[in-house]
């Protein structure tokens, strides 16, 4: 979980029976009620995905953050992936990061056979192409071998979710 300070409160109305059931379930899980409810509402995969996205955004060179995000997406089951990428990306990402992360999510969804989240459609492709290598001799290769979700976003790379260079 993130080390972000908790600055807001959420109250819900439940019956005494429901509260007792939540208390018992939380105790069985070895958690307090707040942690238990948060874990149910915000699955670990979702918070982990958002944390890794923030790591990418907070770095001068997001290469390592994107590699960590790649590792996370590669290990998630279809259900975990669906939970992880359900919420839209933060609006303060650079166009490059938003497109790269959206392409990673689209590629992972296609690989697992699940629906692509709607938020990916709201991210406009890059205006100028991005090539994963400075070598001009590799451009033709990258143009023809980049996975479709990356190509459609004007990003030309050779490795994708689960791959390592």
Image (tube, rainbow, N blue to C red):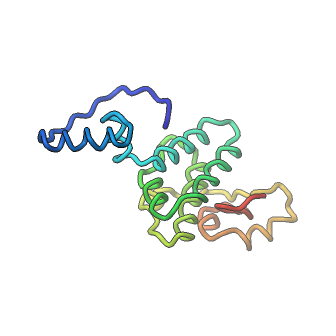
In this view, the residue in front, 19 or 83, is 19
Q: Quadrant of residue 144?
A: bottom right
Q: Residue at x 34, y 33 (%)?
A: 32
Where in the figure is residue 116, as x and y percent of width and height? 46, 65
User: Which of the two residues, 87 or 94, is positioned nearer the viewer here?
Assistant: 87
Q: Position of residue 56 (x, y in %)?
A: 61, 42
Q: Look at 60% across and 56% down and name the residue there.
A: 126
User: Which quadrant of the figure has residue 12?
Assistant: top left
The residue closer to the viewer here, 82 or 28, is: 28
Taking the image as shown, residue 145 lies to the left or right of residue 37, namely: right
- Is residue 110 placed above or below 43 in the rendered structure? below
Q: Is residue 78 above or below residue 22?
A: below
Image: 112 above or below 129: below
Numbered disc total: 0
Residue 27, percent from left and from top = 32, 38
- Could you tell me which quadrant the C terminus lies in? bottom right
122 shown above or below 65: below
| Left or right, residue 146 beside residue 5 | right
Q: Is residue 132 left or right of residue 52?
A: right
Q: Position of residue 141 (x, y in %)?
A: 80, 70
Q: Residue at x 59, y 58 (%)?
A: 75
Residue occupying the point 34% across, 47% down:
41
User: In the image as oriented, which residue stretches furthest toward the front?
Assistant: 28
């Amino acid at each position: 979980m993130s080390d972000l300070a908790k600055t807001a409160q959420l109250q819900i109305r439940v019956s005494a029976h429901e509260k007792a059931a939540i208390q018992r379930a939380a105790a069985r899980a070895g958690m307090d009620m707040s942690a238990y409810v948060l874990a149910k509402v915000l699955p670990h995969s979702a918070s982990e995905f958002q944390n890794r996205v923030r790591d990418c955004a907070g770095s001068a060179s997001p290469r390592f953050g994107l590699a960590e995000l790649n590792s996370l997406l590669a290990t998630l089951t279809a259900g975990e992936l669906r939970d992880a990428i359900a919420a839209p990306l933060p609006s303060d990402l650079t166009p490059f990061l938003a497109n790269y992360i959206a392409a990673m999510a689209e590629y992972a969804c296609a690989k697992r056979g699940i629906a692509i989240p709607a938020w990916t459609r709201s991210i406009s492709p890059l205006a100028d192409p991005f090539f994963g290598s400075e070598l001009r001799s590799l451009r033709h290769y990258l143009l023809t071998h980049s996975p479709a979700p990356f190509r459609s976003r004007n990003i030309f790379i050779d490795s994708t979710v689960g791959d390592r260079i």
